[in-house]
Image (cartoon, rainbow, N blue to C red):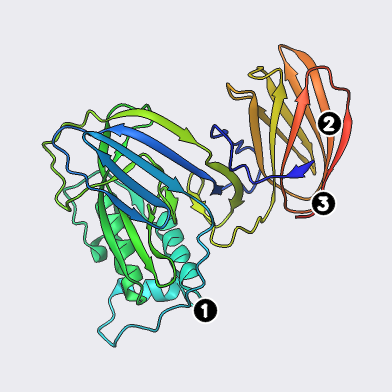
């Protein structure tokens, strides 16, 4: 078995969330989307660290790169003395003891994700202090609280007006997220309840902070290519949040499996270390398991009530590994080296 970067993968593999300890996931790789701009919506070319948007008439092309951020910027000095707000006090408590800016930003994003519940009720105040007191907000309030907490730590951040294409590729909704400036890496997008240190290629940054609510919302996804993979887990985050790594370090073992013949059906069963996980093969004949402890495992491929193939696996370190199963394979043994 070999360690791989998965950067050339063509499809995002569904990840099994069965078993203990599954929470946020770390992503790696890249993706791009070509979209038809909704009528009346104003979008202009824009690029920051990890995101590039170009415009060609009504066609929009977005490229997202989730390579490790690689920031080593230290925690900034405390801002000039001022009357501390409740938001400032929470931010300082959340970031106590950190020495790097990226860790402070990560802690603030994680705190917001854990403690603020999304609420579509726009009749309630969305200023940072009101959101903090209520612990609910829609996207505008979430963005404003996050920005206020970061600014209270001396970290430059701003609210981003945008539009997000729906998962089905047709339509979407107006949205707000945040952008943080790192002295050594520039500006970086984050969406507190969805994605930290990056946003997917379905996110369109609007040219104006005053989104035209009269614009047609009939956005259309024309094409999408993704090599964006979920490769690790972060137990400090709620389930469903994806994170771009800063240092690229793998914390737990991850396994990607594909089978022959290609696009075969069935499910994979992984047992060992006191756990049992099942994962259906996706349409391309692939699946992935994250958050694996070191040790011995047995991987089985079952289809239409028939045992198809199996392998014995041994993870010696927190690697990203892949294995290929062929219909009719007898049980074989492979070992994953320390990364």
- Whether tag 3 and tag 2 are in contact, CB under 8 A, the answer is no
Q: Which mark is residue 97?
A: 1
Quadrant in the rendering for residue 332: top right
Q: Residue at x 71, y 24 (%)?
A: 259
Comparing 314 with 186, the one in front is: 186
Q: Residue 304, relative to residue 313: is it above or below? A: above
Query: Where residue 264 sits in the image (x, y, percent)?
Result: 66, 17
Query: Where residue 62 sits in the image (x, y, percent)?
Result: 36, 42
Q: Residue at x 39, y 29 (%)?
A: 223
Q: Residue 92, relative to residue 38: is it above or below? A: below
For disc 3, the neighbor class at 10 Å (few under 14, some 14 to 19, many from 20) is: some
Quadrant in the rendering for residue 158: bottom left
Can you tell which of label 2 and label 1 is closer to the viewer? Answer: 2
Q: Earlier in the sequence, mark 2 or mark 1?
A: 1
Can you tell which of label 3 and label 1 is closer to the viewer? Answer: 3
Q: Which mark is residue 45?
A: none
- Whether tag 2 and tag 1 are in contact, CB under 8 A, the answer is no
Q: Residue 265, relative to residue 67: is it above or below? A: above
Q: Which mark is residue 316?
A: 3
Left or right of 225? Residue 166 is: left
Element type where label 1 sits in the image: loop
Q: Residue at x 29, y 68 (%)?
A: 148
Q: Residue 259, relative to residue 101: is it above or below? A: above
> Distance from label 2 to label 1 (Cα)?
45 Å
Residue furthest out toward the left:
214
Query: Which quadrant of the figure contains the C terminus?
Result: bottom right
The residue to which callout 2 is attached is 311
Query: Where residue 14 sits in the image (x, y, percent)?
Result: 57, 33
């Amino acid at each position: 078995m070999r360690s791989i970067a998965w950067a050339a993968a063509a499809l995002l593999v569904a990840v099994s969330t069965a078993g203990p300890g599954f929470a946020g996931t770390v992503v790696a790789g890249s993706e791009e989307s070509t979209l038809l701009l909704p009528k009346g919506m104003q979008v202009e070319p824009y690029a920051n660290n990890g995101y590039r948007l170009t415009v060609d008439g009504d066609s929009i092309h977005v490229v997202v790169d989730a390579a490790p951020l690689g920031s080593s910027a230290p925690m900034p000095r405390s801002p000039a003395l001022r009357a501390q707000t409740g938001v400032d006090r929470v931010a300082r408590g959340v970031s106590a003891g950190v020495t790097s800016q990226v860790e402070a930003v990560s802690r603030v994003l994680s705190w917001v994700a854990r403690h603020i519940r999304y609420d579509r009720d726009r009749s309630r105040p969305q200023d940072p202090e009101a959101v903090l007191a209520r612990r609910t907000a829609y996207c505008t309030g979430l963005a404003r609280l996050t920005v206020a907490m970061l600014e209270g730590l001396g970290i430059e951040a701003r609210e981003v007006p945008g539009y997000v294409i729906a998962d089905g590729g047709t339509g979407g909704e107006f949205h707000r997220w945040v952008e943080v400036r790192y002295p050594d890496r520039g500006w970086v997008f984050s969406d507190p309840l969805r994605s930290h240190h990056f946003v997917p290629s379905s996110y369109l940054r609007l040219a104006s902070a005053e989104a035209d609510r009269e614009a047609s919302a009939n956005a259309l996804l024309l094409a999408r290519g993704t090599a964006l993979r979920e490769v690790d887990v972060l137990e400090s985050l709620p389930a469903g949040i994806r994170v771009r790594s800063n240092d690229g370090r793998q914390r737990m073992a991850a396994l990607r499996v594909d089978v022959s013949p290609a696009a075969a059906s069935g499910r994979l069963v992984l047992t060992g270390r006191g756990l049992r996980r099942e994962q259906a093969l996706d349409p391309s004949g692939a699946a992935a398991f994250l958050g694996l402890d070191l040790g011995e495992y047995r991987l089985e491929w079952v289809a239409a009530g028939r045992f198809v193939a199996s392998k014995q696996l041994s993870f010696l370190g927190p690697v990203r590994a892949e294995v290929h199963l062929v219909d009719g394979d007898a049980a074989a043994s492979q070992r994953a080296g320390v990364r």
